[in-house]
Image (cartoon, grey):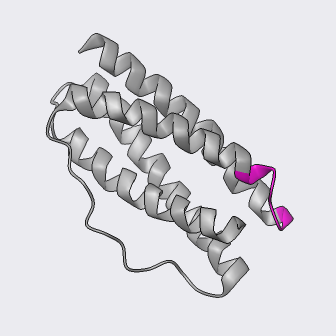
Amino acid sequence: MFTDKLKQAILNEYEDYHFYRSMYKLTDDPYWQSFIEHVYIDEKSHYEMFQQLYYMLTGTFVQDFPEPKECFDLKECAKSAIRDELEAAEMYKEMLLQIPIQQAYAPLFVAMHDETEHAIRFSTMYNAL
């Protein structure tokens, strides 16, 4: 069901935002910091867009989030981020084909595109570290 996938997307975006914020603290390189900051700002935007869409569809917001994971090793976190971002892009592509209302198109398209970009950023970081 679309709303179940949307709820999972909200939880994932919330978790990713906090995970990447903790990643940011592991480097003092301004180049990598700019990559990571760009990603966590996007993740926050996705979270907000998806919460708004969820509210439009259900009349409620997703609440009760689990404790977010933290990053302790920059290279390992970049490696896992590549996988997570590509999986998110794939999920959003599938959701895009199931949208129940036209207002769902833009946030899903933007997030799908951003997640692919994030995978490229983290892949670049992973290969350089």
Q: Nearer the viewer, residue 7 or 33?
A: 7
**Residue at the image position 24 percent from the left and 29 percent from the top:** 76
Instruction: Give the total number of marks visible in the rendering.
Output: 0
Q: Residue furthest top?
A: 128
Q: Residue furthest bottom?
A: 59
Q: Nearer the viewer, residue 12 or 41?
A: 12
**Residue at the image position 20 percent from the left and 43 percent from the top:** 71
The magenta-colored residue range is: 95-102
- List x then y, in percent, for residue 124: 39, 17
* Image quarter in which the N terminus is found: bottom right
- List x then y, in percent, for residue 63: 43, 80
Q: Is residue 101 magenta?
A: yes
* Image quarter in which the C terminus is found: top left
Q: Is residue 13 magenta?
A: no
Q: Is residue 81 above or below residue 94?
A: above
- Is the magenta region chiefly helix, strand or loop? loop
- List x then y, in percent, for residue 54: 64, 74
